[in-house]
Amino acid sequence: MGLHERHRQYSQPLKQTTLGIISRGDSLVLAMKKRGFGAGKWNFAGGKNEPGESGQECVIREVEQEFGTKIKPPKLVAILYFYFVDVPPEKDWDQKCSVFEIDHWQGEPAESEEMAPRWWLKSDIPYDQMWPADRDWLEPVLAGNVVTGYFLFNSEQQCLETEIVLGRLVDE
């Protein structure tokens, strides 16, 4: 089943998740995920929305839990749809991820049980140690675009298909 077929098969909402990109000047914060889904990869702070929680509320809560950093209301810059083939349904990896740009915060991001943050120059982002296809959506976002992305992965976390829509947020 291809990306478009997988996207169309959903009659109920996908699991809602968030990511928050903390940046200043030519640097941003990535964190090594220490446990759980995506462990061993560099990623941004974020997580699953709690029932009734907006994406903005979720990313504010997650950044504080994972980095100890309080953020001001962030700006939505991307909506990403992740689908996984050959993954048992109980793993529930399919998700819609809202990505927020964070440029106002209090407190330096600090290590938690789940994440070990580090500042990176935007020119030195370790894409080879991140999720496959992160470069496809992150580079346009860092260039100032809003992005909608659709991604099809297999159970070995290899990206099989990608579609990127620049200049608009598609919230299906």
Image: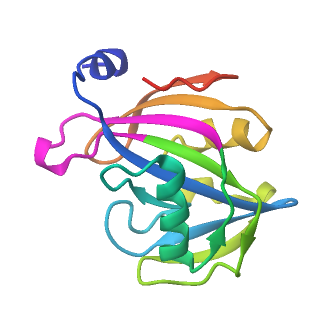
Q: Residue at x 49, y 66 (%)?
A: 61
58 up-or-down from 66: above or below: above
In the rendered structure, the answer to whether residue 93 lies left or right of residue 161 reads left
- Could one spot residue 131 in this view of the protein? no
From the viewer's side, name the closer residue of 86 and 9: 9
- Could one spot residue 169 in this view of the protein? yes
In the rendered structure, the answer to whether residue 146 lies left or right of residue 123 reads left
* Quarter of image, res 144: top right
From which residue to which does the magenta span run? 76-96
66 up-or-down from 139: above or below: below
State the count of labels: 0
Q: Is residue 100 magenta?
A: no
Q: Position of residue 72 (x, y in %)?
A: 69, 62
Q: Position of residue 105 (x, y in %)?
A: 72, 69
In the rendered image, the quadrant that contains the N terminus is top left
In the rendered image, the quadrant that contains the C terminus is top left
From the viewer's side, name the closer residue of 34 and 95: 95
Q: Position of residue 60 (x, y in %)?
A: 55, 62
Q: Residue at x 25, y 45 (%)?
A: 155
